[in-house]
Image (spheres, rainbow, N blue to C red):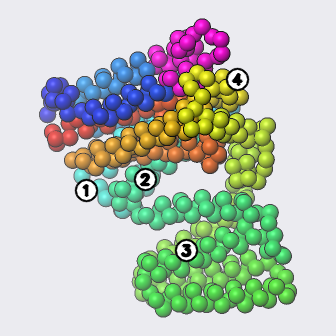
Amino acid sequence: MRSNTRDTWKSVDWFTILLYILMIVAGWLSICGASYEFGSAELLGTSGRPATQLMWMGISLCVAFSILMIERDFFEVFAYLIYVGILLLLVATIFLAPDIKGSHSWLVLGPIRLQPAEFAKFATALAVARLMGTYGFVLTRFHNFILVLGLIFLPMVCILLQRETGSALVYLAFFLMLYREGMSGYFLLAGVCAVVFFVTGMKYAEVMVGETALGSLLVLLMILFISIMLVSIECKNKLAVRWMACGSSAVILVASVVCYFFPFDLNWVVLGVLGMNVVYLVGMAIHQWAGRYALIALFSLASIGFLFSVNYVFNEILEPHQQIRIKVSLGLEDDPSGAGYNVNQSKIAIGSGGLTGKGFLNGTQTKLKYVPEQDTDFIFCTVGEEQGFLGSSLVLILFAVFILRLIALAERQDTVFARVYGYSVASIFFFHLAINIGMVIGLTPVIGIPLPFFSYGGSSLLGFTVLLFIFLRLDASRKEH
């Protein structure tokens, strides 16, 4: 069914487009502020990076409105073809891209540099939406879930091979969409637990209480507590909860008292208690033919395995610069002139802005180039210094309204394809916003992902634009299906 172009323009969500235009203009002004040098005759940066970004803004707007004129069914019909094309481009980038700051993720085409990883986001979202929109598709079926994970992880692996860890981690945002589409919340719980276990294990790895390593003890106790809570919530077996809670508490309490007089590694006792609980859960699973007990036992075993693999992953898999960034973020090392320099200077710049900021083009920290990457990954520090707390809050409110609007649009879709794609878009924007802001103010490690529509970069701006406007095109024709 061919859509009427006039109806499409009437149905498109102009409020979201207005928010988009406001953000790219605000982003361009921020790039001008970050690039401007005191005494320069170029007041608004009509050359250099601001001029380049202005050119990409024009290209992005042309592409955006061109997308709105494409038939809606095009994106669903050619979703897999687009995905395969981008995937092949990602593979080619691994071998063809030059080494730029240790990464092989940029294709150099004369004066233009493109980062295919930025375009893989919308391609992956389309492919996942196409698969999940197939008639009779049920996410909770094991083989369907594995297929979806395959579509998500394939580009993620390719980007990791390009040594672009930050861009690869963005694909974890798809799990927020999967949760909305019926994925068990325990997958998100497992993800949160992995982060908490990692941080706790690393933070207190060197702290010893007698013969006991505090980091491992805290994690093992958390695993024990969570497994008992899961039995209480999922299985509702009061007898099992009593046996596990009372028995575990009694053994650990007695061991703690003995440990006070005869020091030994208490971790082995807690590990033994967890082992007995796992055996008990497996026995309950067999006796009552209830898979929930087995899943909780599996969670306990997987968590223990994760705990003992943390040191290996950290020391053998992560790059040295990534290790230092994590240690600095966790407060394990103080490196103000090395790995922690960017974040320290960023926080100084944001803090110096005060309530109302120093004014447009008047930021001293950014003008004197104290903050590295201040017009790309750390663009938010320019906003904080020049516009202050009020300006920074306004930017965050603008993003909040934008993301909430995307969620509202996704929820009103009348096809699974459009809804899944819409939630994927909202999840990707949310992930970028949360990680970038957390990175700039020191809450998360520096992994190098841009702030949507604000950070300098043509590939980033064009990639986000295509990602957004495909969804707006799908939304504009929702009543046709």
Cα separation between marks 4 and 1: 59 Å
Answer with mark 4 or mark 3, whichever residue precedes in sequence: 3
Which mark identifies residue 225? none
Does label 3 or label 2 sit earlier along the sequence? 2
What type is the residue that disc 4 sits on? Leu
Mark 1 highlights which residue?
136
Residue 331: x %, y % from top left: 73, 53
Q: Quadrant of residue 168?
A: top right
Q: What mark, if any, has residue 368 been given in the picture?
A: 4
Q: Is residue 13 visible?
A: yes
Quadrant assignment for the C terminus = top left
The tag earlier along the polypeptide, 2 or 1, is 1
Comparing 394 with 14, the one in front is: 394
- Distance from label 2 to label 1 (Cα)? 22 Å
On screen, residue 277 versus residue 29, left or right, reads: right
2 vs 4, front mark:
4
Is label 2 in contact with label 1 (beta carbons under 8 Å)?
Answer: no
As drawn, 205 above or below 244? above
Q: Is residue 449 visible?
A: no
Q: Which mark is residue 176?
A: 2
* Kind of residue at badge 3: Ile
Would residue 32 be counted in the magenta stretch?
yes
Q: Quadrant of residue 209?
A: bottom right
Residue 394 is left or right of residue 210, and the answer is left
